[in-house]
Amino acid sequence: MPEGDTIFRSARTLHKALAGKQVTRFETALAPLASVHDDTPVEGRVIEKVESRGKWLIVHFSGDLMLVTHMLMSGSWHIYRAGERWRMPRSRMRAVIATHDFEAVAFNVPVAQFHTARSLERSTTVPKLGPDLLSDAFAADEARTRLLAHADDEVADALLNQRVMAGLGNVYKSEVCFACQVHPFRKAATLTESEVQCILDTSRRFMAANVADGASGAIVTYSGPRRTTHAANRSDRLWVYGRQGKECRRCGATILMRKQGAGARSTYWCPQCQPMLQASHAGSVEKVEGWSVPVRRRKVGC
Ligand SMILES: [Zn+2]
């Protein structure tokens, strides 16, 4: 599933290419969108802005109309210059927004709805998202309150919940827990204040690092598969995600993986760096100090 940073970058690229321009053509393979387009044509409207809210991407048109999309597991938005060949077959096209110089194409997007400001506010499908980790105005206190309100949820599950905070996906969920030495299967209720602070700070830092703007500001049309790190081989940059059975980069213990939550998403962690603290003895269990010293400790709970 695309992480929030991927959607953020897609939205930013689409915004650069489309904002302030008039729609010269709109096409869709989705009947509900076509029906709205028939009644209130998209062509001729001006694209006011393109924004991401967590994993939702919203295209705002003049005249109080928004195209709201969610990528789920398979969808993506590509931007092409007029006449450039698409990198995916036309059969996967779900919507095209064309201006005189660009075409934005949604491929395999499983969730796409037109909304007015009012219908979006009332929508039960589009969730009311928690604070957006990539927003300059990130409301840390609100995120903290929402996280602790999910006291009975396992931490990694709560981090995936876009109503708690918007943006983290399955990869960062495990990486953030590792960075904060938090066992991903602990209940949110067992988090200490400093652990909560670490989770919020680290989540923002990891997300922000992945949306750092290129120097040129040029619009890069679709150029290959999603890239989440600056490393040539992204697995070299991850601490635990996808590393089941390999040595922890910090302590040498074997990285574990277990399916977690209603969606049975893969969760990775180091049993030594991220001990399972039970709430009942959270006050008495020593914390691992520093990262460099391999600590031989009794495994607790995992
Ligand atoms: Zn470790």
Image (cartoon, helix red, strand yellow):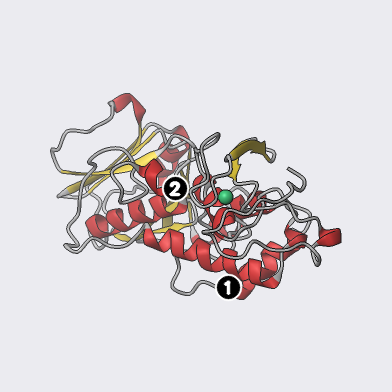
123 up-or-down from 266: above or below: below
The residue singled out by tag 2 in the image is: 238
Q: Secondary structure at mark 2?
A: loop
Contact (Cβ within 8 Å) of mark 2 with mark 1: no
28 up-or-down from 12: above or below: above
116 up-or-down from 231: above or below: below
Q: Secondary structure at mark 1?
A: helix
Amino acid found under the numbered disc labelled 2: Leu
Left or right position of 197 against 175: right
Position in image of residue 231 (x %, y %)? 31, 48
Position in image of residue 57 (x %, y %)? 43, 52
Q: Estimate the spatial distance between the alpha carbons at disc 2 and disc 1, rounded to whole Å.
A: 25 Å
- Picture quarter with the C terminus: top right
Q: Which mark is residue 140?
A: 1
Position in image of residue 147 (x %, y %)? 68, 63
Residue at the image position 44 percent from the left and 59 percent from the top: 207
> Who is closer to the viewer here, 76 or 105?
76
Can residue 79 be seen here?
yes
> Ligand 1 within 8 A of label 1's CB?
no
Residue at the image position 15 percent from the left and 43 percent from the top: 82
156 up-or-down from 32: above or below: below
Residue at the image position 70 percent from the left and 48 percent from the top: 185
- The numbered mark, 2 or 1, whose residue comes first in the sequence reads 1
User: How packed is label 2: few (under 14 Cα within 10 Å), some, or many (20 or more)?
Assistant: some
Can residue 263 be seen here?
no
